[in-house]
Image (tube, rainbow, N blue to C red):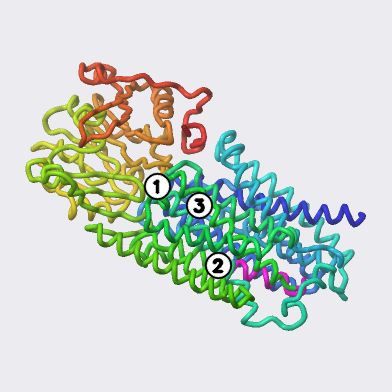
Amino acid sequence: MNSLTSKLLFATTIFISAFALFLVQPIIAKQILPWFGGSATVWAICMVFFQMTLLIGYAYSDFVSHQLKPIHQVIVHVILLLVSLSFLPIVANSQWKPTGDEDPSWLIIKLLIFTIGLPYFLLSTTGPLIQSWVARTFTDSSVYRYFSLSNLASLLALICYPFLIESRAAIEGQAYMWSVAYAIFVLACIGSGIYFLRHVQNNITPSKEESSLTNDATTSTIGFKNYFLWIAPSCMASWMLMAITNHITQNVASIPFLWLLPLTLYLLTFVLCFESDRWYRPIIVWPITAVLMGLCAYGLNNRSVGADIWVAIPLYAAALFFVCMVMHGELSSMRPSSQYLTRFYLMVSVGGAMGGFMISWMAPRVLAAYYELGIGLALVALLMTILIQWKSVKVIALSLSIFCGAYLYLQIEDDFNGARWIGRNFYGTLITADVTDGPAIEHKRLLIHGSIKHGEQYLDASRKKEATAYYGATSGVGLAIANTQQHNQKVGVIGLGAGTLAVYGKKGDVYLLYELNPDVIEIANKEFSFLKDSDATITTVLGDARLSLEKEAIQQFDVLAVDAFTGDSIPVHLVTQQAMTLYWKHMKPQGIIAFHVTNQYLNLAPVLVNIAKQQGLHYALIKDVTDNPSLRDTDWILIAKDPSVLEQTAIRKATGQITPIPKLGIWSDDFNNLLEVTK
């Protein structure tokens, strides 16, 4: 095997491993989402598992490459690779479904360990371990380019999954295809190990790339300073990735797939900075970064900059790209000789995990709102004072840090001055605020989640029981409640909001309100009076509605309102065949299920129509266009088993036309794709 062919073998192994590493995350997470409620909690637990396994994998690579002889490295790794094949295919066994009395967090972790644990671990070891083999095989190789290649593979996987894979294959099919790719990776990795053993060089001379490095980690023992300088930029790049993603998806716009943009830019900077030194030019990149960071800090307290979709998204995306170019560019300039290669990658992984942990776990528990972006901007500027060598620029960076900190303070002050209640948990930031413009009879209290208003109530005593926002008498849900059983009515509501639908409750009625976020229940009871003023018997149920309905006795609902869709935050498990079947187990024969499908970015009506047709149900689109200032224009889909229910005059007059989506599949727990319904 000649040198070019062998390098291609190493490169192919690294590429396949990075591609598969990125693909397995959505494949396995989507398999188990319906089992555990489809909430963001499931994604978070999965991400913790993936990050920790990646970190352990990098630690393994560092240990093996330094402590074991080449023959033992290959033997140990090949044995693990062969054992990992027993995990295939990576289809989660139904025995892991929760029964209701266990901690779902630990159950998910155990499920992941026994379903994909060893394969994911070995994929995570590949980049640093194979690069260490390359360094000991080809002394003339630019080994860090392989790191650029692995990030390019991750970037391609990120783009391919939603646009090419998810839209064409069901979840189980994706799992089988991934398993085939993993088997190919195992063969390539074993081949790389065999070549390494045959050509390993025990006495390594520095490569041309290493000879050009001037940092002290190339010639002397690494110490705390090196560890800090490797960890800190990686940590802040990861921090800014997640902080800016939170900001643009929560505070600017809930646009489907918007989260792809920052992650793509983040990976692209890794590709550029480690491909070669030509892409990162401090004298050009530093000034642009400083200006963009200053504008981002200003935007935190100025909605025309920080919340306007046409200004904020390009601004914060550009800022993330240049901040990551600085962080990753500095990391690349501090890359050590191949002797310390695996240790370098381990510290980079530690930094990335720290940044992710602080934003995904600590921030929701410590910060009252999305303040991590302002904190991150100030910390990045402060880190620049350490990374920059020019004294005059250090002063500018320090000034920038103070500037960013000042606008963070103004952001916090503005939030707390304008809010009655502000709080944050894992599900996001909730704010209640009073709007007191105009006459007193028009004063309102709002419930706001990011950029979305989730409910409002008039403050005047005479109007407190007035239906507002999306829930007027002429809306789909209003018509459903008015045109079903009139006495002792039983209504279920998935998605509490401010509790507005309780205004329709009469004496003898029963309302069951399902809500995932405990803060929403607290706000609905303390900040709004819809629930306590209702004449119906009101019960709130904390937890995922689908899981709750699966455990409950048959409810016999007259109306079930499904109102848990916000922007791109669609709990898909609530709009699948399996979910519809479950809902009808709890409905009366003449009952109506009302789905709230008002959405600026997603066209969910055809999804529900396809499911209704497949299950022999009847449907109507209620498109309510109103000039009432207290109400919103809304779209509701009403679904019934009894067609006569939808033929009542009020419903029939309000029924609109539904434009089908060509080639739209029938959504199930196994197959669904938001790309199909993106407007």
Nearer the camera: disc 2 or disc 1: 2
Q: Give the mark nearer the N terminus: 2 vs 3.
A: 2
Q: Which amino acid does label 2 sit on?
A: Cys
The reply, left or right, for residue 439 in relation to residue 393 is left
Residue most extreme to the front: 392
Judged left or right of residue 9, residue 406 is: left
Q: Is mark 1 on a helix, strand or loop?
A: loop
- CB-based contact (under 8 Å), mark 2 and mark 3: no
N-terminal label among 1 and 3: 1
Answer with left or right where residue 228 lies relative to residue 677: right
Local crowd at mark 2 within 10 Å, few (<14), some, or many (≥20)? Answer: many
Tag shown at residue 37? 1
Q: Can residue 67 be seen in this view?
A: no
Is residue 399 highlighted in magenta?
no
Quickly name the residue at label 2: 235
Does the residue at mark 2 contact the one at mark 1 (Cβ under 8 Å)? Answer: no
Q: Which residue is drawn at 43% across and 42% down?
A: 568
Q: Name the residue under label 3.
A: 315
